[in-house]
Structures are given as structure tokens and as C-alpha cells.
């Protein structure tokens, strides 16, 4: 088996790490060739992408032979066997390391362009390269991730020698590689196109694939200032931004919301996933069902978003109690402020006092086997004064866990936003929203 190029390798590798989807993962592409591979993986997992800058320490008179590797955060791997066999002195090793450390620093600055690194603390670091030979650079990257506080380190590469697990050792908690051929000689032999990746390509991958980690300031019921955690991704040429309001027991990491968010991004929309409540508030059932509070948080997050992207119309995607918050917030912000609302298995009845004031076109999606919620949505539809549609997905329960059910939800939501968000950007509603 061979790969067409690094993009093809990334798409195949994404399938192999699909079990990580929905987890709190940060994908780290090793510079330079691993970054295009990692960008495809990050896109498939709907995970933030960062670059791991590593440098091989080559033998002075034979630089293609690795005697070690260095990474950021002081990570360092030394192959004592190579150093002994090549008769490398301490002075020679120090000179090579000094040169490579200077280049590592230059690349890190160039790639990030002043942007901070994505936080790894308490998260899963998925380290990705375009292949592995000796394992020195991969191990350095894994150690760097540990130093940055990653709770778990997964190393994933498209191709590696059969004994690659032994070479990595305990530097990674999990290893993923779909191709380990017995005739492995070099990574490049398994690619039809293995042209060197440029610095410009690395920068482009990071700019287009990396969600912005959002800290959204809000004020709680006691007047104290809080910060909500979120992820904002606005692709180049976006025609709107879809904000996700989750229901009880869910958050920005909800696999269902992230699945729908990926469909929105593929349709050309930006997405903002964030936690409506702090960790302390989530343990309080009164806060979970406080529609006024949730709507206020959504309204404040909308204000934060518009400060950054005033040119883009906003749509709300709400689930369960989050749907009630979305409708309430849309009503409070007036005609034209919110371009469209989609409710998935929602409880619009919880926004009862505000339903008649909602002017945004609203799509209500309910599972065919969620009979109680179907009736609640029918009653709410009668109170909504805006353009409204109620769609029942046959055979689906409240969480749309049945095969194909969530895909149908994503398609319905995508089509609704495609019909209303670009229209709002072109019309007077966009001017009011800005």
C-alpha cells in the first residue's frame, strides 16, 4: 500500500484514530512534513491543530543519520549507540545541538506568528507525523507534550517499521499506525508524492485548520465575572457563524454537537462551541434548567462573537434545554439580530414567555419515537410568529443515537442555515446584526 501524498495519508490516518473523536484532543503535527497529515486528522476529529517543532540531531559528517533529536520545552533524545559507533565527541554533539536549537526557535516563531500554543494541560495530545523511521523526533515531540501537561499522549503515523513500538517505548501511551511493512527502508518509499513541505505550507495549514480557544467573559447572577471556555473556528470565506447551545449534561465536547459542527464547517460556516455554565454551575440542577440564565450567557457570547466578526450573520443550534435558551436569546436580541435557529430534540416550551417574540426562522427537529417532545414542539410551533418548520426524523429517539439519525439532523440543519444565513448577510438584517 502507498499513499498518494500527505493529504491522502492524513485522511487514512484519520480513520485509524476515529475512536478519539469527541474526546478532548489536541492534534500536534510535527514540522514540517507531519503538519499536512495532522491537518487532515484534526479536521476529521474536529480538534484544534498545533505544530510540534522538532529537529533531528544529525551526525556531523553524515547528517541524514540521527544521533538524537530535540523538541520544544527542553525535550531531548540521544542515541548513545550511534554516538559511540560514530565516535562523536561531547563538543561535536553540543555544536550540532546548538545549531539545531537556533533553527528550532526560528521555525517556532515563524509558524505561530505570535499566536500562543494550544494548551495541553489535562488533555489528550495526538502527535502526528508523516511516518516514522528511527523514532527520535517522534519521541522528542511526545516528551514535549508531557512537559506541557498532557494527561495522555497518543502517537499516530501512517507508516513505520515493524518494530516501531519498541523504538518509541513508554514515551507514548497509545500507538496508531495502519501500515508497518516488513520491507520498510524509508518513509518516502510509501508515498507517490513526497515533495518537501515548505514553511509557507505549514503556516497555511495552521491558519486554516486551527480553532481559536475562546475565553468568553460573562457575569453570573451574583454579579461576579466568569469566563466560559469555547472553541471558535471561522474558515476563510465563511458566510455566517453557527453558535451551539447545549442541553443538560452536555458541553462543548459533546460528540453529537461536534458532529453537527463539522457538517456546518463543510458547508462554509464558522462555528462556536462553548460551555454555557462553569464547572461549579453544572453541578447545580437549578442552573442547568434556568433558561433565563442560559439565554443570558448565549446573548453575552453572541456579543463577544460580533466584536470579532461583525460582518457575519449568526445562527443558533440548540439541543434539549439549550434550544429553549437559543429561542429566548433570539427573542431578547430583536428582529434580525439572529438569522436562524435550529432546535434538535429541543424543549422550546421552556422559553414559553418569549416564543411569540422570536423573529428568526426556526427549524424544530424531533425524533419520531420522542413522543412527549414532539407534542411540546407542536405546541411551541403554534406560538412562534416567525417562519417555522417542524421535522420529525422517523425511528429516532431523543438523542438521535440510531444509525443515520444524527446525519439527517446535520443535513437538515445545514440546509436551513444555507437558506437563511447567506440571505441575512446580503440583506438589511445583516446591517442590524452588525
Image (cartoon, rainbow, N blue to C red):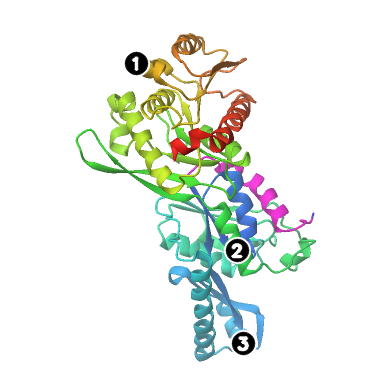
Bin the neighbour count of mark 3 within 10 Å (Cα to Cα): few under 14, some 14-19, many 20 and up.
some
Residue 154 belongs to magenta span:
no
Q: Residue at x 23, y 33 (%)?
A: 221
Residue 11 belongs to magenta span:
yes
* Residue where numbered disc 2 is placed: 202
* Residue where numbered disc 3 is placed: 60
* Residue where numbered disc 1 is placed: 353
Bin the neighbour count of mark 1 within 10 Å (Cα to Cα): few under 14, some 14-19, many 20 and up.
few
Q: Is residue 351 visible?
A: yes
Q: Which residues are magenta?
A: 2-24
Which image quadrant is residue 350 in? top left
Residue 422 is marked as none
Closest to the observer, 137 or 236: 236
Which image quadrant is residue 225 in? top left
Q: Is residue 128 visible?
A: no
Q: CA distance from mark 2 to mark 1?
A: 51 Å
Indicate which label's residue lies in the foreground, 2 or 1: 1
Amino acid at each position: 500500500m502507498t499513499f498518494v501524498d500527505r493529504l491522502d495519508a492524513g485522511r487514512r490516518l484519520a480513520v485509524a484514530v476515529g475512536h478519539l473523536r469527541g474526546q478532548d484532543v489536541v492534534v500536534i503535527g510535527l514540522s514540517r512534513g507531519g503538519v499536512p497529515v495532522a491537518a487532515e486528522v484534526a479536521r476529521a476529529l474536529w480538534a484544534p491543530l498545533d505544530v510540534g517543532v522538532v529537529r533531528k540531531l544529525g551526525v556531523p559528517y553524515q547528517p541524514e543519520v540521527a544521533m538524537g533529536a530535540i523538541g520544544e520545552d527542553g525535550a531531548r533524545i540521544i542515541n548513545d549507540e550511534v554516538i559511540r559507533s560514530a565516535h562523536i565527541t561531547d563538543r561535536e554533539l553540543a555544536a550540532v545541538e546548538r545549531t539545531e536549537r537556533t533553527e528550532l526557535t526560528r521555525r517556532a516563531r515563524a509558524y505561530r506568528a505570535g499566536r500562543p500554543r494550544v494548551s495541553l494541560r489535562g488533555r489528550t495530545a495526538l502527535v502526528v507525523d508523516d511516518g516514522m523511521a528511527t523514532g527520535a523526533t517522534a519521541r522528542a515531540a511526545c516528551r514535549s507534550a508531557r512537559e506541557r501537561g498532557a494527561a495522555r499522549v497518543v502517537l499516530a503515523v501512517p507508516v513505520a517499521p515493524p518494530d516501531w513500538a519498541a523504538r518509541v517505548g513508554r514515551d507514548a501511551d497509545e500507538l496508531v499506525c495502519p501500515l508497518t511493512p516488513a520491507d520498510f527502508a524509508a518513509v518516502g518509499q510509501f508515498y507517490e508524492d513526497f515533495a518537501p513541505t515548505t514553511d509557507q505550507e505549514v503556516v497555511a495549514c495552521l491558519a486554516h485548520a486551527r480553532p481559536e480557544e475562546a475565553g468568553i467573559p460573562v457575569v453570573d447572577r451574583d454579579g461576579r465575572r466568569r469566563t466560559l471556555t469555547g472553541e471558535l473556528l471561522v474558515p476563510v470565506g465563511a458566510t455566517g457563524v453557527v453558535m451551539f447551545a447545549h442541553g443538560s449534561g452536555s458541553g462543548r465536547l459533546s460528540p453529537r454537537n461536534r458532529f453537527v459542527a463539522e457538517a456546518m464547517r463543510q458547508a462554509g460556516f464558522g462555528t462556536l462551541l462553548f460551555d454555557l455554565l462553569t464547572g461549579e454551575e453544572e453541578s447545580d440542577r437549578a442552573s442547568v434548567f434556568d433558561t433565563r440564565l442560559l439565554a443570558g450567557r448565549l446573548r453575552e457570547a453572541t456579543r463577544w462573537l460580533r466584536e470579532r466578526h461583525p460582518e457575519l450573520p449568526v445562527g443558533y443550534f440548540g439541543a434539549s434545554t439549550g434550544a429553549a435558551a437559543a429561542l429566548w436569546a433570539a427573542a431578547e436580541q430583536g428582529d434580525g439580530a439572529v438569522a436562524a435557529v435550529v432546535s434538535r430534540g429541543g424543549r422550546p416550551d421552556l422559553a414559553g414567555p418569549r416564543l411569540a417574540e422570536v423573529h428568526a426562522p426556526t427549524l424544530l427537529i424531533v425524533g419520531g419515537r420522542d413522543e412527549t417532545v414532539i407534542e411540546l414542539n407542536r405546541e411551541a410551533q403554534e406560538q412562534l410568529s416567525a417562519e417555522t418548520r417542524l421535522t420529525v426524523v422517523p425511528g429516532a429517539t431523543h438523542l438521535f443515537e440510531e444509525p443515520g439519525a444524527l446525519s439527517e439532523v446535520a443535513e437538515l440543519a445545514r440546509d436551513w442555515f444555507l437558506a437563511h444565513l447567506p440571505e441575512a448577510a446580503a440583506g438589511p438584517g445583516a446591517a442590524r446584526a452588525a
